[in-house]
Amino acid sequence: MTDFAQVAAQLEGQAIELPSWAFGNSGTRFKVFGSPGTARTVEEKIADAATVHRFTGLAPSVALHIPWDLVDDYVALRRYAEDQGVRLGTINSNTFQDDDYKLGALTHTDAKIRQKAIDHHFECIDVMDATGSRDLKIWLAEGSNYPGQADLRGRQDRLHESLSTIYDRLGEDQRLVLEYKFFEPAFYHTDVPDWGTSYVQVAALGDRAVVCLDTGHHAPGTNIEFIVMQLLRLGKLGSFDFNSRFYADDDLIVGAADPFQLFRILFEVIRGGGYGPANPDGHSDVAFMLDQCHNIEAKIPGQIRSVLNVQEMTARALLVDRDALTAAQEAGDVLAANELFMDAFSTDVRADLAAWREERGLPANPMRAYAESGHQQQIEADRIGGTQAGWN
Ligand code: PSV
Ligand code: MN
Ligand code: MN
């Protein structure tokens, strides 16, 4: 098997983008619990993301959601983020919290409502121009609840038209990233339910339109790594929204529910050429992002744990001896191939990663370092008054 020293260099420059909304209060439809120290402003969310980066060296950028992260001056916000040591990343649009969109936004039968949703995306592109963001990420809550309620084909055609109009507005260095989700909030049909639909829609737009794979957006038992392989093969895997699920779109800590699945996904990313150090402009082609909420656990250490889980599984996936694996596969040696794969998954890389961090001036154990730093107590004491940020 490959050993850690052979892969250590490939861990350099790994970047995992954090969602600003992970630092706001969140919950289920039953209850949102408030936690002391929760960010009250966009700036405090960015400061929290920067704290995660300081302790791990893994999270150099933070994604914004518009209008949750609405401010007057995005150039000033960009400067603020840079002063904190992070970059503003993906801009997420939001067409799921406005009464006008009850029956659809980009797919609505009413041209005025479609235009309103398109205009929202134009505003997001203006934000991207100010923040220097590359990616506009679109997740649509659109669909129907009852058979016969909507013309499925008409909605797909209108979706194409609306997305084309948005795509045409993007700058040369910007990308449109279309996320899919198999159900919720619509329960009978969803307009972008799966990777195939997302692929068909982005393929019709052009090279700078790609797919976002949110690991929580699949039916139980789905072979997600197969989808990863196929999208990479087609050159259309733009980004990940990483999280864990047990039942539906649970948004739990990545790698918590099924570490082996995360390993299998990362192996396919590496195998398919989707893993690599960031480009000189700070972006890698397949963007790693988290899309999580921390409903009952503390938010900053929840994010620290998450990026460490991704790093740990990346290291283990890099340990697969690919030449030996190919030889075993081609020899038809089923059990040897499986053993090679499982050996890498079963390797405990925690001590090696701790040493790797120390060599780079990072805490060997970022979770412990954060707990001992007093930072959590400090923000709980400082952030008194004002309204804590929420998931929305
Ligand atoms: C939808 O469930 C989703 O995964 C999309 O990425 C949204 O932007 C995000 O969650 C909001 O939490
Ligand atoms: Mn998502
Ligand atoms: Mn989701």
Image (cartoon, rainbow, N blue to C red):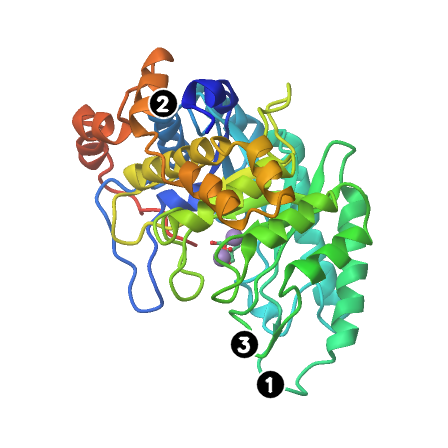
How far across and down, in percent of the image, does residue 72 sit? 54, 37
Disc 3 marks a residue whose amino acid type is: Phe
Give the quadrant of residue 174.
Answer: top right
Residue pictured at 59% horizontal, 59% vertical? 95
Q: Residues within 10 Å of mark 1 (few under 14, many from 20)?
A: few
Q: CA distance from mark 2 to mark 1?
A: 49 Å
Q: CA distance from mark 3 to mark 2?
A: 41 Å
Left or right, 286 with respect to 358, comes to right
Image quarter of the C terminus: bottom left
Q: Is residue 121 above or below residue 381?
A: below
The residue labelled by disc 1 is: 146
Q: Nearer the viewer, residue 122 or 374?
A: 374
Residue 63 coordinates in the image, percent (x, y):
51, 39
Q: How many circles with numbers are drawn on the protein?
A: 3
Q: What residue sits right under mark 3 in the picture?
A: 187
Q: Amino acid at mark 2?
A: Arg
Mark 3 or 2, nearer chain start: 2
Tell which circle, 2 or 1, labels the residue nearer the N-terminal end.
Answer: 2
- Kindly indicate the quadrant of the structure image that contains residue 74: top right
List the residue tagged with mark 2.
54
The answer to whether residue 126 is visible is yes
Alpha-carbon span between mark 3 and mark 1: 8 Å
| In front of the other: 122 or 14 | 14
Secondary structure beneath dot 1 equals loop
